[in-house]
Amino acid sequence: MIDVSRSIKKRDKWHFLRLGARWDRSVVPIYEAAARGKCVPLLKTLLTSHCRNECAYCAFRAGRKCPRMIWEPRKLAEITKRLWEERKIMGLFLSSSVFKDSDFVTERQLETVRALRNMGYTGYIHLRLMPDVDRHYIREAIELADRVGVNLEAPNKEVFSELCPDKGGFEESVRKRLEWIVDEARRAKAETTKPKFGFAKAGVDTQMIVGAVDDNDWQHLQTTEWLYGKLGLKRVYYSGFEPVPKTPLERQAACPPSREYRLYQSSFLIRDYGFTLDSFAQIVDDEGFLPNVDPKLVLAKTYPDFFPIDLNAASYREILRIPQIGPMTAKKIMGARKNVKIRHVADLEQIIGANLTRRVSQYIELKDKKLTDFLKVNKGI
Ligand code: SF4
């Protein structure tokens, strides 16, 4: 029987559980993933840390000395099931290094999640597949997992070949695999009605490293628009580079957290707010970097002619362009205006409250607001 002992370390969103008897001990990493404003504890692990590749930033690159381990699929499935039954986790996030080859790893990832489902596990499974993964494995992964992805690692092939010199080609090994995953997820969705679990019902995702080599925000935004707009990905993750000792990039400066944050904000503007890449072309600097300011605010100041907005006539997308207004508030305004004309400050206060009204009134046509609010926008204050 697995004995879940004390949490042995706590740092940020991670904690670790030590499981098992003295002769059969495992330490499993639990990650508190953010999902719709809640923290969802996931067993987040690599199938193995053995790797044949030499990615320049990675702690597990082949030539670097570090502890190497490999999960036995059945054991990982049993531990996941047990932790899930004990409500210590709500799901499994399974990625891997590339031990031997992509097929070797993928077969064991699938063996793990197949065993898990056969044990009656209905919890969440997020699978990160390997570069060069074969299409028939993707099909099975989609059926078993709730979210499936493959890491792009870089916004384009030039950056990719600098970061991952032996991980295959950017187009063939990762970009095409991501397209296949999207295709298979769409096919599975068309063929299945309301599955309880699996069938990639939580969508497809990917991740890019930011700031490790000579990349810029514009490159990341170009790729992000393609990922959200053309491929319909659910989520694009940015992982700010952190130098790892005894890697070729150990002396490289870490990516500032603010850069990662501004990229996330901008990507959500593309995904959820209908902003196009063209809008961002006006706000990146000559080197292709975003300013370290809320991008929605910068966009509002860059396009002052767009304001003030008549909330009685504006479309949902137009309302969403107002700084501080998100999808929920925009929907609230759209719902309220069916019953009432929004002409005065007091009308808007009734819908979104006095605080928010004060913060957004400069962008909205309202009869009795202060003239200085219009001036703020038009002068780009
Ligand atoms: S393939 Fe993955 S684990 Fe291996 S070196 Fe590259 S990033 Fe690291």
Image (spheres, rainbow, N blue to C red):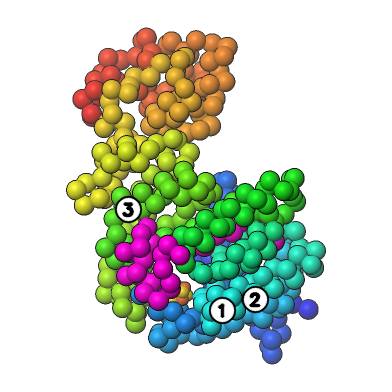
Q: Residues within 10 Å of mark 3 (few under 14, many from 20)?
A: some
Measuring 50% from the left and 85% from the top, which residue is drawn there?
67
Identify the residue under disc 2: 108
Depth check, mark 1 against mark 2: the one in front is: 2
Residue 313's x, y, as percent? 45, 15
Packing grade of label 2 (10 A; few <14, some 14-19, many >=20) is some
Q: Secondary structure at mark 3?
A: helix
Say whether marks 1 and 2 touch (CB < 8 Å). yes
Residue 200 x, y percent position in the rendering: 64, 54
Per the image, the residue denoted by label 1 is 48
Nearer-the-camera pick, 9 or 24: 24
Numbered circle sitting on residue 362: none
Q: Which residues are magenta?
A: 144-172
Q: Which residue is mark 3?
A: 219
Q: Label 3 is placed on what type of residue?
A: Gln
Circles 3 and 1, Cβ within 8 Å, touching? The answer is no
Q: Nearer the viewer, residue 39 or 204?
A: 204
